[in-house]
Image: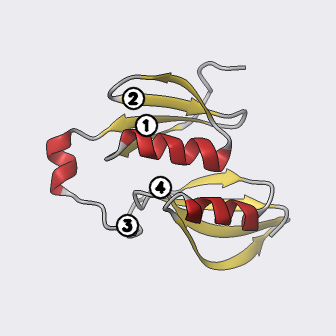
Amino acid sequence: MPGPRPAGALIYAANLDALAAFYREVFGMTTLTADADHHVIENDDAQLILHAIPRHIAEAYPIATPPEPREEAAIKLFFTVARLSATAETVTRLGGAVFGETYTFGEMYVRNGMDDEGNIFHLRGREA
C-alpha cells in the first residue's frame, strides 16, 4: 500500500533519474511521486527519497566511471534480497558493484555493494 513509511532514507543524487532507476530495478521499488528535484520510491519494506544535488555542487564533485566507493560515510543502508548472487548481477549491470567477501551473520549471508554513484549499501539474504 503506497504512502509514507514509518522510516526510510534520503539519498542525495548527482543524476536523479539514473539513481532512481537503479534502486527501482535492483530492489523492486516503484515511484510514489517524482518531480525535477525529488523522487520518492518504495517497496513493501522501505521508502527512499532521492534528492537532486544542485548542478553547481554536483559539478564540483564528479563521479568517476566506474564509481568509486564512498567509504567514509557514517551510515550504510541495508537491503534484504532473495539471492545475493542474482542481486549482484543486477547491481553490476546497472553500473554499481558488489565487492568484498560474502560472510554470514546469524542466518543471513551478507555482502557489500554500491550504487552507480558510489553510495555503499549492505546486501543480506538467506541464499548466497
- Lower position in the chain sequence, tag 3 or tag 2: 2
- Lower position in the chain sequence, tag 4 or tag 1: 1
Residue 40 in the figure: left or right of residue 102: left
Eyeballing the image, is 51 above or below 61? above
Q: Nearer the viewer, residue 43 or 92?
A: 92
- Lower position in the chain sequence, tag 1 or tag 2: 2
Whether label 4 touches label 1, CB < 8 Å: no
Disc 4 to disc 2, how far (Cα)? 21 Å
Disc 4 to disc 1, how far (Cα)? 16 Å
Whether label 1 touches label 2, CB < 8 Å: yes
- Identify the element where label 4 is drawn: loop
Disc 3 to disc 2, how far (Cα)? 25 Å
Dot 1 amino acid type: Leu
Q: Which quarter of the figure has residue 42?
A: top right
Q: Can you identify the residue that label 2 sits on?
A: 38
Dot 3 amino acid type: Glu
Dot 2 amino acid type: His
Q: How many marks?
A: 4
Q: Can you identify the residue that label 3 sits on?
A: 72
Q: Nearer the viewer, residue 79 or 60?
A: 60
Eyeballing the image, is 104 above or below 38? below
Q: Which quarter of the figure has residue 72?
A: bottom left
- Lower position in the chain sequence, tag 1 or tag 3: 1
Q: Can you identify the residue that label 1 sits on?
A: 50
Q: Which mark is residue 75?
A: 4
